[in-house]
Amino acid sequence: TQLLEQSPQFLSIQEGENLTVYCNSSSVFSSLQWYRQEPGEGPVLLVTVVTGGEVKKLKRLTFQFGDARKDSSLHITAAQPGDTGLYLCAGVASNTGKLIFGQGTTLQVKP
Amino acid sequence: DAEITQSPRHKITETGRQVTLACHQTWNHNNMFWYRQDLGHGLRLIHYSYGVQDTNKGEVSDGYSVSRSNTEDLPLTLESAASSQTSVYFCASSPVVAGVSGTGELFFGEGSRLTVL
């Protein structure tokens, strides 16, 4: 069974702090997506990374795909209350072509 | 604007009853998916369709069925609802299939919260 392990599962921080969320697997992925989900809504795509070592920035959010394409990280600088939500990583497994979701990281940013 | 809508947004039913959750998209996407979301499990794929008359089982398909008679709709039916099927259900669509011809960005509906008593 292919798994994507996200850590931490829950994170509660103060406004202005930095944080990193990790998405790890023993499997290789041809691409990896990060979604954000707000309460009562469906997930919305933030970014897709496709190349090993790739770094993408979206304002205060920095996404990195591991060199071996087995892991990814999401770093948020100076978190704001508007960043609160559930962050999901999802990878396309290279050997099966299936899209697999991690369990999610719930982020709470307190004002 | 194109969108994907789910109905009902909230449903309470009893064990053994048949329930259908509707999903309608105006993106004109061939690919549609049903997921369930439970705490600690992320999103798990129930069924998916790559086009009209095409349906496929996902990793947690037992007790569920889908049909695809047109491009816009993929209703999800619980034949005989069980308490284990209490969950939030998300429908999604995609213009390409992940791993086949692209990275397969998913466009999600707002979810249907189902409670089986």
Image (spheres, coloured by chain):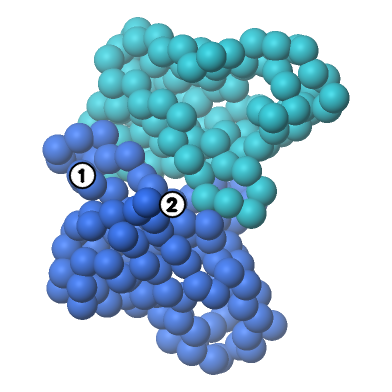
Q: Position of residue A69 (x, y in %)?
A: 33, 18
Residue A110 in sight here: yes
Badge 1 or badge 2: first in the primary sequence = 1
Read off the residue under disc 1: B96
Q: Quadrant of residue B32?
A: bottom left
Instruction: Name which residue type carries label 2.
Output: Phe
Residue B65 at x, y percent in the picture: 35, 77
The chain that hosts pointer 1 is: B
- The x, y position of residue B18, in whole percent, is 48, 89
Query: Which residue is found at the position 30% from the left and 35% from the top?
Result: A92
Q: Residue at x 54, y 36 (%)?
A: A36
The quarter in which the C terminus of chain B is drawn is bottom right
Q: Specify the chain shown as blue.
A: B
* Disc 2: host chain: B
Residue picked out by circle 2: B108
Residue at coordinates 44% horizontally, 36% vertically from top-left? Answer: A45
